[in-house]
Amino acid sequence: MSGSIGARKRAWLYGWLYSQQDAIVFADPTMLLVHSPLLTSATWDALRSQLEAAGWRVAVLDLRPLVETPSFHTAVCTAAANVTHGAPTVVVGHSRAGAYLPGIADAVGSDQLDVVFMDARLPHPGTSWVGSLPPERATWLREMAVSGRLPTWDTWFPADSLADVLPDPEQRRQVLHGLPELSWQVVSEVLPTPGKAWDSARHIYLQLSAAYQSTAEQAEERGYRVRSLDANHLAMVTQPAMVMDLLLSALQP
């Protein structure tokens, strides 16, 4: 109970500070959650409930309808700009959503914004998803594509490895249900150079798994605020209270 109260106070204080700095009063501190294009918005369900109980107003993008658009990046940014009532104070992206966070930051147009990379890839403006990969990884991805599409993410790994990350069968079913097959145009789209809103935002990196340690180190070298949790890539599903505490502590002024 005391942890929940503490989280609620932190969320309220953070929203109050923003309203004082900008003379914009939000009904609640506002957070936009962006899932990996390889997954679905179900990855945020548990964390969203925790955040809303702590006093946050939360908006969640659903990227699945956008994967067939001519420019996935443009569609994601447009959706982000339209999904919230008033500019969010925080944008959080998980995994492969990280590459789209600079564009989203510019699209939502907030003067005071925290951009949070949650076990996420760092931005790679001027190149594509596949172009940002090491050569052997890029070759692996190309060889996996069938008729111009990537198979669903859950087929990329042995089944037992996903059971390790999502040990609860019902959680695993919910998270893996309805995963998209990505068009190769999503993977090959070159991302643009970000604008002023991204440049002026505060950049935060939350490392959830050992696999993203080197990425977290790169983020720190770029000047991001970095916080870590000894968990796994989908800890916001399996340990949402711990992830919320990590997130809210990283958002402290």
Image (spheres, grey):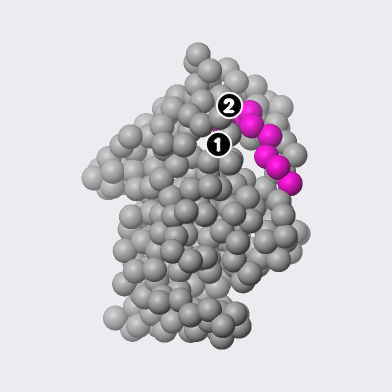
Label 2: few (<14), some (14–19) or many (≥20) C-alpha neighbours in 10 Å: some
| Identity, as a three-letter code, of the amino acid under mark 2 | Gln
- Three-letter amino acid code of the residue under disc 1: Phe
- Residue located farthest toward the top when viewing the structure as drawn: 147
Residue 211: give x, y in percent of width and height: 57, 47
Q: Is residue 39 visible?
A: no
Residue at image x 68%, y 59%?
Answer: 198
- Quarter of the picture containing the C terminus is bottom right
Residue 184 in the image: above or below residue 216: above
Q: Nearer the viewer, residue 40 or 142?
A: 40
The answer to which of marks 2 and 1 sits earlier in the sequence is 1
Marks 2 and 1, how far apart in space? 8 Å
| Residue assigned mark 1 | 72
Q: Residue at point 36% right, 75% down?
A: 54
Residue 18 can be seen in this image: yes
Q: Which residues are magenta?
A: 186-193
The residue where tag 2 is placed is 185
Q: Nearer the viewer, residue 26 or 33?
A: 26
Outermost residue toward the left in this view: 170
Callout 2 touching callout 1 (CB < 8 Å): yes
Residue 166: where, in percent of width, then height?
Answer: 35, 46
Q: Is residue 115 left or right of residue 135?
A: left
